[in-house]
Image: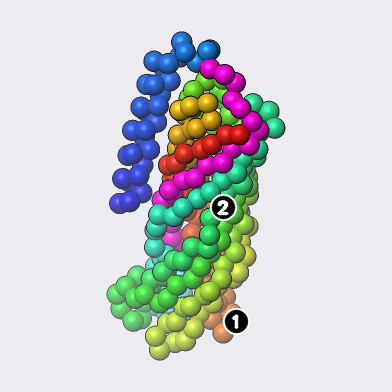
Amino acid sequence: MAFHRLAVVAVAAGMLAAVFSQTTFAQSADLAPATGNWMVRLRAVNLTAANKSDAVPALAIPADAIQINNKVLPELDISYFFTPHLAAELILTYPQQHDVTVMQSALGGPTKIGNFRHLPPILTMQYHFTPESRFKPYVGAGINYTRISNVNLQVPGVGPLDLSKNSFGPALQAGFDYRLTERLYFNVDLKKTWISADVKMAGQTISKVKVDPWLLGIGLGYRF
């Protein structure tokens, strides 16, 4: 539900920015060129996991029954503009904790089995379509690296579980900046990343979890 609420806000913000961009189009030519090659953005991001997983017949766990919680998290990104159209963006946050729930198993209904932390930096290359205007849409593609730590998973009556510690996957991105002042920008950003981890018991892989989240963010940027 949080994702849908944030999506509605993002769409409304995009429509509002588009209206503003049309009403200020005549003024855009009078804008001073964007200042500086660096840009820093701070966003509130809603993470919505795909929650796909293999079945574990030995524990009567069906496919897609291993799930992590969705959450809102802070995100900091640092961008460098090589040209007015091309930029590289490094997306950062601090290690995020997620709860793990098995929705169905030999134990019955939903069972929380613990939590873990993950650190998911993303590096993308972006193309900005209209750098000379107030409304600046962009697309990007790159790579995600996820480091998993502090795994604390325990299946009652069975024993501890572990997760593979490293995951590499592609990342896609689309969004826009709306120029508020010479240096300050309003930003909406949507990313899709592919993240997976092996679930292990006694050193043996028993399932693969595909988190593959959507990340919808709203925030402010400062260019210098």
Seen in the picture, residue 205 relative to 210 is either above or below; the reply is below
Specify whether residue 194 is in view: no
Going by the image, does 5 lie left or right of 25? left
Residue 20 falls in which quadrant of the image?
top left
Specify whether residue 24 is in view: yes
Within 10 Å of disc 1 (Cα), the crowding (few <14, some 14-19, many 20+) is few
The span picked out in magenta is: 31-53
Q: Say which of 110 and 53 sits in front.
A: 110
List the residue tagged with mark 1: 203
| Picture coordinates of residue 136, whole percent (x, y) | 51, 27
Within 10 Å of disc 2 (Cα), the crowding (few <14, some 14-19, many 20+) is some
* Eye-nearest disc, 2 or 1: 2
What amino acid is found at the position of numbered circle 2 in the picture?
Leu
Q: Secondary structure beneath disc 1?
A: loop
Q: Earlier in the sequence, mark 2 or mark 1?
A: 2
Seen in the picture, residue 37 relative to 212 is either above or below; the reply is above
Residue 146 falls in which quadrant of the image?
bottom right
Q: Say which of 43 and 1 sits in front.
A: 43
List the residue tagged with mark 2: 92
Going by the image, does 62 lie left or right of 203? left
Q: Secondary structure beneath disc 2?
A: strand
| Picture coordinates of residue 55, whole percent (x, y) | 45, 70
| Picture coordinates of residue 115, whole percent (x, y) | 45, 72
Seen in the picture, residue 163 relative to 145 is either above or below; the reply is below
Identify the residue at horizontal 33%, vertical 39% (top origin). 9
Q: Say which of 73 and 114 sits in front.
A: 73
Identify the residue at horizontal 50%, vertical 50% (top origin). 75
What amino acid is found at the position of numbered circle 1 in the picture?
Gly
